[in-house]
Image (tube, helix red, strand yellow):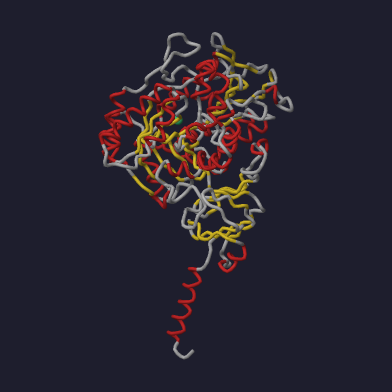
Amino acid sequence: MKNPIIFLLLVLGFMSCTQKERATMIIKNANIYAVDTTYTGDAIAIKGDKIWKIGTWAEMEPYIHASTEIIDAQGNFVMPGFIEGHGHYNGLGNSLINLNFLKASSWESIVDAVADKVKQTPPGVWIMGRGWHQEKWDSIPSPNVYKYPFHNTLSEISPDNPVVLYHASGHALFANQKAMEVAGINKETPNPVGGEIVRDQNGNAIGVFEERAMDLFARKYEDYLASLDKEALDSIWHVALRLAEEECLRKGVTSFQDAGSTFEDLDKYERLAKEHKLRVRLWAMIRRPVDELEQKASKYKRKNIGNDFYTCNAIKSDIDGALGSYGAWLLEPYQDKAGFKGQNTTDIEDLKRIATLCADNDLQFCVHAIGDRGNRMVLDIYEVAMQNHPDKKDWRWRIEHAQHLHPDDIKRFAQLGVIASMQAIHCTSDAPFVVQRLGQQRAKEGAYVWRSLLDQGAVVTNGTDTPIEDVDPIHNFYASVTRKYNRDTPAFYPEQVMTREEAIYAYTMANAYAVFEEHMKGSLRSGKLADIVILTKDLIHCTDDDILDTEVAYTIVGGKVAYKK
Ligand SMILES: [Zn+2]
């Protein structure tokens, strides 16, 4: 080569050419379930954050380079990442901030867990936990009083954080030295009326406080929360977010539809998305009183911020309460509360104002409705809004829960294109009291009737309402296809089950459709986001019992491994 410049150009040309033809990740030995199409191959090539090619391993081989990450799925079930259709992200995080010792088998394991927590917690921040029970431990601590350990080992690992751990019964707590210091407790502190400070032979508190003695800490903890500055509250918020993310990724959830955030929360999500610091894709509904919504909601619309990690395009409201607490708004009285028909929680006029706001600003409206009257009223409000805007075609307004419907209203979901944003797991965990509340006939005809809705042509989505239920899609999938909570529980009107295919569709494509994202996620296709889970059981072909043993082997978000078993 005589001319070095031509040589250089040729080399550069060759390099950029191979760059184009290089996969960043290839998943091989995959039992591919693509949701809306079928492939004969067993390999998926990913380039950047998108799915690139799907085919056989031999077809993918030319695109392998030294930097290509190869994931061997070992014949496991490979499907699009689960989309949580209705949950509370912040609530999930907060529920995970506090330590849980229901399964702790020794005092030492509790001290170790607190020590880990201390490492991630700034000094002065209270560490809270619950669920310990000295009768469930493998060994009796030494020294001890009534089998309760002394606080010393706990206090040594947490010198700068007050630690308060509630007993499983809720009738006692364990405090470390720092917490006792903050609460002003010393040898001279008398036992409060109705409570006991458990002491050693010398009269020193060992760390256990029973019954009313717990109040000494409860008050101080409330003072502490009230005293927090913006920075501290912010740091708690961020810890909660990280915990929620980890929990979702561990369980195969790659996108999360948040059912109601404040403007403050939305600002934080947006900032994190722009900084590429979100690990789970968020789609958020705004939840505020109507006056505030009218002032600000339209300014908070966002789409696909930070490489498609954050969108806000909806408003959340509620028309009634829950069935368990007689809050669901019914057409006819409760079977077990004579003459009572439940609660209307948001003024109908306010809901109509929000509907107008949504229609005018092209926002989706998502209203919580549980009882048959609540659902009918929301369908009526949506129908009027649609009649008032005949030019607008694609609404995709949602009813959150759509739990109990009058048979006449079931077909209206499909007719109006209203999405039934349901939570299958609510059906199976509510099952023990549904018939008491509604009686046989209403329960059979209208409670959690996802089969009837699907047969009428409605879009039915799925989610968990976490932290009300565990965010686990597997348990929820099991509820969808069996109408059972567990292997041993009876099925709740099993004629309403979804097929396996429908249940996966509800958790992927239907959830994507429900937020106008079906072009970018919900199935495995070239050009869609590489949000993928690898599961240890084949959710289409395994037995019902096997579903509950399914584990998440990998969670991949945007072409990167976000969780690995
Ligand atoms: Zn909810």
Q: Specify whether 179 is left or right of 149.
A: left
Report the front residue among 14 and 57.
57
- State whether residue 150 is above or below residue 510: above
Q: In which image quadrant can residue 139 be found?
A: top right
Looking at the image, the residue that sits furthest to the bottom is 2
Quarter of the displayed picture in which ligand 1 can be seen: top left
Looking at the image, the residue that sits furthest to the right is 139
- State whether residue 223 is above or below residue 551: above
Report the front residue among 272 and 52.
52
x, y percentage for residue 565?
63, 46
x, y percentage for residue 64?
58, 66
- State whether residue 417 is above or below residue 335: below
x, y percentage for residue 304?
38, 49
x, y percentage for residue 534?
60, 49
Q: Residue at x 58, y 69 (%)?
A: 62
Report the front residue among 44 and 395.
395
Q: Residue at x 73, y 24 (%)?
A: 140
Q: In which image quadrant can residue 234 be found?
A: top left
